[in-house]
Amino acid sequence: DFTNLIFEKLNCGSHNLRIKGTRVSMNLYEMAFQERSGFNVNLFETEDFVIENGLSFTNTTILPPDSYLFLPELVFDAGGNWKRFSSFTDKVSLRASLRDSDIHTKTLSYFIPGLSRNSDILLKKTELTFSGPINDFAGELINLSTGDTRIYGSYALKGVTDIRSVSFDLD
């Protein structure tokens, strides 16, 4: 439920806190948490976490059980209007790139309603980009593979938060 995220058991270290005008930045390390859905992150580390016009992360590693995610770029852009976060799925623009990541379908099941948590597929060396609000984003699928199957191309998702009306296009 992207509209009501609640993080529990949150632990984190930080260093290099920098404040300049309205910009706050720092390095985060050894962060771990559990979202109320049961989704766990055993490790979240980023070289540069910036609070200015939204949230941005640089060279971020995320380790949920069964997956390895590396995001050179992860940005939640609210255009300087923090009230947009109250309508996160429609009014906050997400821009990210994922590189050399192994994503298990068990991890994806927390974000894709209808995908069974008992599914057992590992997507290896995944690379993709995406941009736009959660409910209407697009990007490039550079590599998505499992075994001998490889998928690549441009994609777009619309209506992601309502699984009954979601639209997925792949070119």
Image: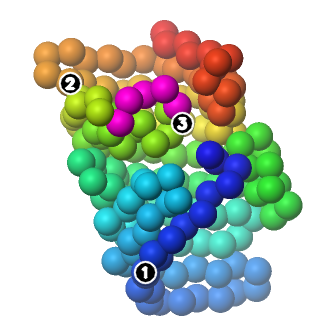
Residue type at mark 3: give it.
Phe
Of the two numbered discs 1 and 2 on the same chain, state the one appearing first in sequence: 1
Residue type at mark 2: give it.
Thr
Query: Residue at position x 55%, y 13% from top?
Result: 169
The answer, for residue 109, to whether it is visible in the render is: yes
Residue at mark 1: 11
**Secondary structure predominantly adopted by residues drawn in magenta:** loop
Category of crowding for the residue at label 2, using alpha-carbon neighbours closer than 10 angstroms: few (below 14), some (14–19), many (at least 20): some
Residue type at mark 1: give it.
Asn
Residue 128, position in %: x, y? 41, 34
Residue at mark 3: 130
Residue at mark 2: 146
Residue 74, position in %: x, y? 52, 54
Residue 62, position in %: x, y? 36, 59
The answer, for residue 28, to whether it is visible in the render is: no
Category of crowding for the residue at label 1, using alpha-carbon neighbours closer than 10 angstroms: few (below 14), some (14–19), many (at least 20): few
Of the two numbered discs 1 and 3 on the same chain, state the one appearing first in sequence: 1
Position of residue 154 relative to residue 75, above or below, is: above
Which dot, 3 or 2, sits closer to the camera? 2
In the displayed orientation, state which residue is furthest to the left: 147
- At mark 1, the secondary structure is strand
Image side of residue 6 versus residue 97, left or right:
right
| Residues drawn in magenta | 113-117
Res. 158 image quadrant: top right
Position of residue 7 relative to residue 165, above or below, is: below
Q: CA distance from mark 1 to mark 3?
A: 28 Å
